[in-house]
Image: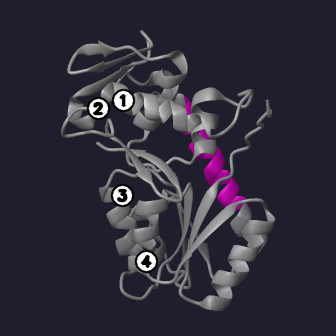
Amino acid sequence: MLKLKIMRNFKILIVEDEPSISEAVEAYIKRAGYDTLTAFDGQEALKLWQEQQPDLIVLDLMLPKLSGVDVCKIIRAENSQVPIIMLTAKSSDADVVNGLDSGANDYVSKPFSMRVLLARIRAQLRQGDLNSGENNLNNNNVIKCAGGRIEVDKSRIEIRKDGVPVQVTKSEFLVFAALASQPIKTWSRDEIIQAALGDDYDGFDRTIDAYIKNLRRKLAEPDHKNGWINTVHGFGYRLED
C-alpha cells in the first residue's frame, strides 16, 4: 500500500490591486513554498476568504470596492482569527493605528523588502501554530455542531446525535472530530489526513471518502441526508453547522 507523507502547505491570500506588486509578492511567496490565492479588490478578497479559508492574508489598505480596513473588520466580526498583515503606503501613526485597530496583526509599509514581508509571514504562521496548540490543550473536551444536535466527546472518543451515541470506528471519529473543530473550513483530503490521522497514515487519500460515506450513513436523517457533511466540489468537505 502506498505510504503517504503529508506536509502541510500553508495557503496565503494576497489582496493587492496593483498587478505588478501582486505578481511580485505572489512569485516570492510561492518560491518560499507556500500556496497562494490572489484578489484585486475588497469584495473578491472576502469571497476567497469565505470559500478557501486561507491560513494568512496579506491585505493592501487601499483597495477598490471595499477598503482593506473594511475587509479586516468584516473578517474579525465573523470571529475569524486568521492572521492579517496589512500593506500600506500610508505610514503615519494614525494610519497604522487604524489598520491595527481594525484587527490586523501586523503591517508593512510600502515600499517594502520581500525578505521582510516573508519574515513577517513566517512569524505570524508560527504564532498561529503555537496558539492552536495551546487552545487544543485547554479547550473543552466536547465539541457541539449541527446546531447543537451533534456532540463530539474527545474524552470518550464518542459521537452523539441528540444525546444518543452513534457507533463509529476510531478513524471515523477522528475524521469527524477534525471537521467539527473548524465547521466553516473546507477541508481537502490531505488536510483531513494530516489533522485526523497524522503523518504516519499508511493508506490512500481516497480512503477518506469511505470514512465520509460511512459517517453520512450513520448520521443521516430525512432533513440531513448527507449527515451534515457537505461536498465542496473540486476542494473537499465541509461540516454544515
Task: Tally the numbered discs.
Answer: 4
The span from disc 2 to disc 1 (Cα, nearest Å) is 5 Å
Residues at marks 4 and 2 touching, judged by CB atoms closer than 8 Å = no
Q: Which residue is mark 2?
A: 220
Q: Determine whether 196 is above or below 168 in the image.
A: below
Q: Main secondary structure of the magenta part?
A: helix
Which one is closest to the eye, mark 4 or mark 2? 2
Q: Which residue is mark 4?
A: 44
For the C terminus, the quadrant is: top left
- N-terminal of the pair, mark 3 or mark 2, is 3
Q: Identify the element where label 1 is drawn.
A: helix
- In depth, the one of 222 and 122 nearer the eye is 222
The circle on residue 217 is 1
The span from disc 4 to disc 2 (Cα, nearest Å) is 35 Å
Residues at marks 2 and 1 touching, judged by CB atoms closer than 8 Å = yes
Q: Residue at x 40, y 70 (%)?
A: 47
The span from disc 3 to disc 2 (Cα, nearest Å) is 33 Å
Q: How far across and down, in percent of the image, does residue 147 sit?
A: 21, 36
Can residue 111 be seen at all in this image of the molecule? no
Residues at marks 1 and 4 touching, judged by CB atoms closer than 8 Å = no
Q: Identify the element where label 4 is drawn.
A: helix
Numbered range of the magenta stretch: 119-133
What amino acid type should be assigned to the residue bearing mark 3? Arg
The span from disc 3 to disc 1 (Cα, nearest Å) is 36 Å
For the N terminus, the quadrant is: top right
Q: What is the crowding at mark 1: few (fewer than 14 residues within 10 Å), some, or many (at least 20)?
A: few
What amino acid type should be assigned to the residue bearing mark 1? Arg
Q: Quadrant of residue 30?
A: bottom right
Q: Residue at x 69, y 36 (%)?
A: 204
Q: How far across and down, in percent of the image, does residue 63 sit?
A: 45, 85
